[in-house]
Image (spheres, grey):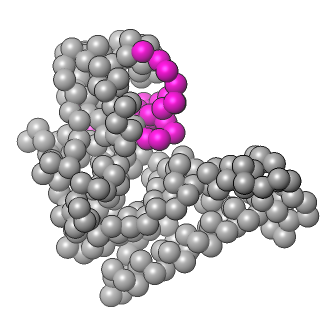
Amino acid sequence: MNIIAIDIGNTSVDIGLFCEDELTRTARISTKDNKSEFEIANSIKSLLKIEEINQNNLDIIISSVVPNKTQIVEKSSEIINNKKPIIVNHNFNLPLQNTYNPPEDVGIDRLVDSIAAVKLYGSPSVILDIGTCLVFNAVSSDNEYLGGSIIPGLNMAADSLANSTALLRPVELRIPENFIGKNSIESIQSGIILGYSELIKGVYKKYSEKISSQKDCPLIITGGGAELILPILDLEYIYNENLSFMGLKYIYEQENN
């Protein structure tokens, strides 16, 4: 069976195609566009080259944290293969014990990432998604989803500076030449890039001490904003840009066993 895994986030809709067990193609479209279901379906077909595979042997699974986008992507999915897609929700029998309070308040994307991390790298583990927000997740050695932390993302922080001050303007985020900023642009870049890298190290240390008696649980990082941080993040980590796709694949397999 071929699977399209779709992860709808606040900034982008990430799309991956599994042919049998292999993730063969990935693509990304903007969450904020106003395309119709037909346009989205055509985009997915084109980006993933769906015409090259048997669409009768194709299922689609979706996770979403943007309810008003879920409906249109669901309709797009039905156009692609004439089937109802699987929409992951909190009622699924997921391979983690969700201890969030209440359980349905945790973003389904956080559970999907955590399922993939445990399946691939074991537990306990700390999972960090660097996207619109920085989202930490903690999983215990008993495969309990414990919760986490939500922090404004890098671009959100930069936009906040520009929008909340009279003299600071928007800047392109990148690692500055001087960490002690020599001008306003470098100062903002340094404050955000260096500041967030130190924040990640500090939060991970606290989490690791809390959930692992040996303080040796892995840090698994994913998300489109990771490239801004990873070059200067001086601690051990595992980076997997396809964590959400893998989590959706594992959920699909469990639902179809």
Q: Quadrant of residue 118?
A: bottom left
- In the image: residue 94, left or right of residue 196: left
Q: Is residue 215 above or below residue 98?
A: below
Measured from the top left, where is residue 95 in percent x and y?
17, 57
**Magenta stretch encompasses residue 29:** yes
Q: Quadrant of the N terminus?
A: top left
Q: Residue 89 or 51: which is nearer the viewer? A: 89
- In the image: residue 15, left or right of residue 133: left
| Residue 101 visible (yes or no) | yes
**Furthest residue to the right?**
182
Residue under the point 19% across and 23% down: 84
Residue under the point 48% across and 32% down: 31
- In the image: residue 184, left or right of residue 244: right
**Furthest residue to the bottom?**
213
Q: Which residues are magenta?
A: 9-36
Measured from the top left, where is residue 190 in percent x and y?
76, 63
Residue under the point 34% across and 40% down: 64
**Magenta stretch encompasses residue 47:** no
| Residue 16 visible (yes or no) | no
Q: Quadrant of the C terminus?
A: top left
Q: Residue 232 or 145: which is nearer the viewer? A: 145
Q: Residue 24 or 116: which is nearer the viewer? A: 116
Q: Quadrant of residue 139?
A: bottom left
- In the image: residue 197, left or right of residue 66: right
Residue under the point 12% across and 51% down: 93
